[in-house]
Amino acid sequence: MCDQQIYMLRALDLARTALGRTAPNPAVGALIVRDGEIVGEGFHPRAGEPHAEIFALQQAGELAFGADIYVTLEPCSHQGKTGPCADALVAAGIKRVFVGTIDPNPLVAGRGVRRLQGAGVEVQVGICEAECRELITPFAWHIEHGIPHTLYKAAMTFDGQLATRNGDSRWVSGEESRRLVHHLRDQIDAIMVGVETILADDPQLTTRLAGAGRDPLRVVVDSCLRIPLKSRVVQQQSSAVTLIATTSQAPAAKIAELQETGCEILTVPDVDGKVSLPELWRELGRRNVQSLLLEGGRTLAAAALNAGLINRLQVYIAPKLLAGAGLSGLFAGEGCTLMKDALPLENLVVEKVGEDLLLSAEVKRCLQD
């Protein structure tokens, strides 16, 4: 591994510090190197604050003159809530700029690179490009489609059961897997379940990490507003809002009661009496939700999958056997009758997490139908 890759990987680590906190902007990290030594580091903490390059320049001070900067995403060239980073790099006397990947935002999309080159700054694009592109996947998906990039997470036993025949699912996966899920919650914009999950498990949908964990927006899909007023997503205090997506069938009195608790009620057009998931995804996109974690409900998961709204799957497989009739299958519904009609997955990754196996894959036909 060359020095350029080592420096860019460090910039990626800096960027990951702010995952889930920067929407509508992407997470970005920057590193300034002079004579083989790191003299400045920075990451974009949240929208409205300086970008990663500016923090790195501030830390480097005069040492930035004649130095190199490694930045995970192309420096911006337009005036937003902050000034153009490309201009700031030129003014600081940066000699070379190493860029992980070009910004997919049409307001930038190569303009930052051209601006730097026009000012005589040497620019090299593509250092650890795959890793840098993966980092901004939700941002790029949101830019292109206007909806959140969606990950469906579930846990099952070795024989493919989500719960016992009585519905008990606490806990299918092991402690390390559950801890990893809380880290994931800390890094995404919103978490979603259906009302059946609320009724069965009464989850908190919060991030429980020692230190600086944050709670994502909590979204409950409840077409008829059956959610109990005493449920924990309604009653428990959190830094995150609880957004309940419902339809015109929802009783006005129940809406008022939930609003009094601090919940936000979103009335969404319905399809056959159910919340239209494409409409809900578009509304979340308008609210700058770039990344969405779908955590509960075979019925909701099936509806989202059939609508082409799930991008990735994460399935934890526990070394346990129910050896009988449990609540089987990741998705509700009849499914296909012929194997040739099975929905293809790609980029399968298998890893060990504590006592469990974690399978991750991308849904090949997302939004293509």
Image: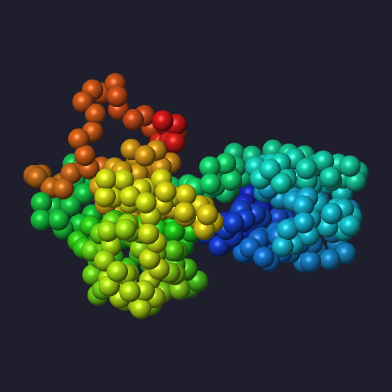
Please give the name of the residue rendered at 37% of the width and 51% of the height, measured from the top-left corner. Answer: 269
Q: Quarter holding the C terminus?
A: top left
Residue 18, given in percent of the width and then of the height, sits at: 58, 61
Please give the name of the residue rendered at 44% of the width and 69% of the height, measured from the top-left corner. Answer: 240
Residue 328, given in percent of the width and then of the height, sits at: 18, 44
Please give the name of the residue rendered at 48% of the width and 59% of the height, measured from the top-left corner. Answer: 189
Question: What color scheme is it?
Answer: rainbow
User: Is residue 60 shown to the viewer in this render?
Assistant: yes
Residue 79, given in percent of the width and then of the height, sits at: 77, 56
- Image check: 122 left or right of 361? right
Query: Which is nearer the eye, 325 or 288?
Result: 288
User: Is residue 56 shown to the viewer in this render?
Assistant: no
Q: How many marks?
A: 0
Residue 115, given in percent of the width and then of the height, sits at: 84, 45
For residue 116, which quarter of the picture? top right
Q: Quarter holding the N terminus?
A: top right
For residue 181, which quarter of the picture? bottom left
- Image check: 214 left or right of 40? left
Query: Which is nearer the eye, 206 or 98?
Result: 206
